[in-house]
Amino acid sequence: MKFSDLLRMSASNLLRRKLRTVLTVLGVLIGTASIVVMISLGLGLQKSSLEQIEQYGGLTTIDVYNWTDYYSSSETDTDALIDDEVVEAIGAIPHVEVASPILSVSVMAKFGGYEAWLTVCGMSQEALQSMDIEVSEGSLPTDSDTLEFFYGNQVITDFYKAKTYEYYWETGELPDVDLMNDSIFFIFDTDAYYNSQYDSSVSAPKKYLVPASGLMAGGVDEYKDNCYYVLADIDALRAQLKKVFKNSVIPGQPSTKSGKAYKDIYYEEVYVRVDDMNNVSEVMEEIQNMGYTASSNAEWMEQTQQQMSMIQLVLGGIGAVSLFVAAIGIANTMMMSIYERTKEIGIIKVLGCDLKDIRTMFLMEAGFIGFFGGLIGLVLSEIISLIINQVAGGASGGYYSGISYIPIWLVGVALVFAVLVGMLAGLFPALRAMRLSPLAAIRNE
Amino acid sequence: MDSSAQAVIQVKNLYKIFRVGEEKVRALNGVDLTIRRGEFCAIVGTSGSGKSTMLNMLAGLEKPTKGEVIVAGEHLERMSENELVRFRREKVGFIFQSFNLLQTMNAIENVALPLTFRGVDKKTREARAEKMLKLVGLSTHTKHRPTEMSGGQQQRVGVARALVLDPEIIFADEPTGNLDSRTSEEVLGLMRRVVQENNQTMVMVTHDRHLAGFADRIFHISDGKIVKIEEQQEYREDEK
Ligand SMILES: Nc1ncnc2c1ncn2[C@@H]1O[C@H](COP(=O)(O)OP(=O)(O)OP(=O)(O)O)[C@@H](O)[C@H]1O
Ligand SMILES: [Mg+2]
């Protein structure tokens, strides 16, 4: 038999008993909708928690530290320290996209009646570009030779009134400092500054004017990765420090036994970015084998993922129950239909309809029920999902990107699943129809 | 009929035994017969004598308990159900007592049904069905559903359906059982004419001694055995 004829016969059989078909489709519709909505809730939850992790430093970044404490032991073996060579070696590990040293120094900022202790992090251009930092004003630090600062959105809260030592979180008033345009002076030799405050014989260290390159987007209360740091281009920062400290030891850098500075600069931390979330642990292991400490959000994420798949399983299970009930409905409808059509099936068998075609015809009918139930069920799911997000989104103040999330693959999977469930439910009735005796047609009722 | 014509149906030592509880019913009790190509045969006998069982066996609708059934060169007793369906699709036309048209389809669709099972496309099969309906004198009723036709008209559709595939053999189990005698004769005359024109073989079961008179040969069956074979020398035009 031609496929189009099979299709036509199945369809006309369904249309013959409209009400029953509609009711059966309704069952599948509800089953599909409940399964899809449940899974979408799980997925929405997963998505928003991944987004949360993203805010805390991303899913593909690794921090590399060297826990060898070079303050206490001046015997430090410089081989174990992180220098440019080590950074290069890390950069050569497969899947690593960016590896940049982080040179961080503590500086004092002064403007008007305000002072602030700030941490300046120098990073490579590549790393700065890769961090997806949103810029509200100006730009990220450029790779020019003069030092420029890029301010995190919470840096402003570090400024306090020099006279009263009052911070923003005490007064609730933002310091009157325009980070972008005011001429702020910085003191790099903080030890000397400290000494000069209590010992009048020590002259105050030199102050430097550093222009701002830009500001990070976001309000004062908005937490983001790097929001309380001042970012700078590492080469410019290194040059500036060399200029300030000349031959003496830069604070935070190791020194030789005799207290002299090394020629090279060493770093406490390396910023590593990996090409894909799934390669993070592999790269981390590699770095740990090199003898350094590495940390990332991978573990946190893994835990979250596990929890999420658990939740999804439970939610999906709840939805599956109703689809199972719908499947029984399909089987029942098909069985009824076969009892009614016993004679008809007998006739077409006498007339020479292939057994295979009879089976296909019934499977197609069941598949149709599954397909239409699934299709309308998906439309319903989208509507429900929209309503949930509207209601819940309004309640939580837009914190979540959506409680219910239906990705395109879920649509496809749900539809295929509904059709399969339909056909599976129709399989037994279809085999039954295939085996019916043609003699049923001969007997007179 | 030319006695040298080849045998289309051959039955050898055929038994069919039904088991009802403890009891055994011998519906067919050792039947041998041969039907030649182009013959119009009738099977007559009292009720319960085994006529329908015989016919079903010839059409491959029932499995013999013992014996051989060779139709159009094929051993039916050795075939699987799949093969039997194929056999019917290719070789056999069947006319039922209760017409057995599909209620949801109109006359033309019903007649085209066997062609559908053969995978013939819609246009071709409907054209052929229409021609068939014209042949049985129903060209004005092509779009009627079975419920919108009289018994005689329905059986004409049934005849058209059985003949549309141009089968080698046509089986009919009391094709006129639900029709009055005048209509019966009309339908039977039609069948007889078409079958003879196409040199097809026809086997018909009937109660009616008079209607059996249309046949070339009449098999008398009683208690599952053929008790008499009546040969009619010529088709009596005058009785029509
Ligand atoms: N499926 C069956 N199970 C048990 N016994 C059966 C079955 N089919 C037929 N029989 C028996 O076989 C015998 C012959 O039946 P069959 O239907 O061939 O009779 P028939 O000659 O066609 O009768 P009628 O003229 O009334 O149609 C009967 O005794 C009947 O009871
Ligand atoms: Mg009978």
Image: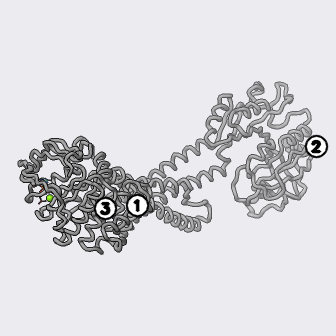
Mark sitting earlier along the chain (1/3):
1
Same subunit, tags 3 and 2: no
> Which image quadrant is residue B143 in?
bottom left
Residue A284: x %, y % from top left: 64, 35
Residue A318 shows in the view? no
Depth check: A130 or B232 in front? B232
Vertical comparison of A94 with B11: above or below: above
Residue A377 is left or right of residue A288, and the answer is left
> Which image quadrant is residue B7 in?
top left
Graded by Cα atoms within 10 Å as few (under 14), some (14 to 19) or many (20 or more), the crowding at tag 2 reads few
Tell me which chain the residue with mark 3 is part of: B
Depth check: A378 or B54 in front? B54
Residue A361 shows in the view? yes
Vertical comparison of A147 with A322: above or below: above
Spatial CA distance of label 1 from label 3 is 11 Å
Amino acid type, label 3 = Arg
Residue A305: x %, y % from top left: 54, 47
Residue A413: x %, y % from top left: 50, 53
Amino acid type, label 2 = Ser
| Residue receiving disc 2 | A203
Amino acid type, label 1 = Arg
| Quadrant position of the C terminus of chain B in the picture | bottom left
Tell me the tag on residue B125. Answer: 1
Quick one: SS at disc 3?
Answer: helix
Spatial CA distance of label 2 from label 1 is 110 Å
Depth check: A158 or A389 in front? A389
Ligand 1 lies in quarter: bottom left
| Residue receiving disc 3 | B161
Depth check: A309 or A161 in front? A309
Query: Residue at left 77%, top 40%?
Result: A102
Quick one: SS at disc 1?
Answer: helix
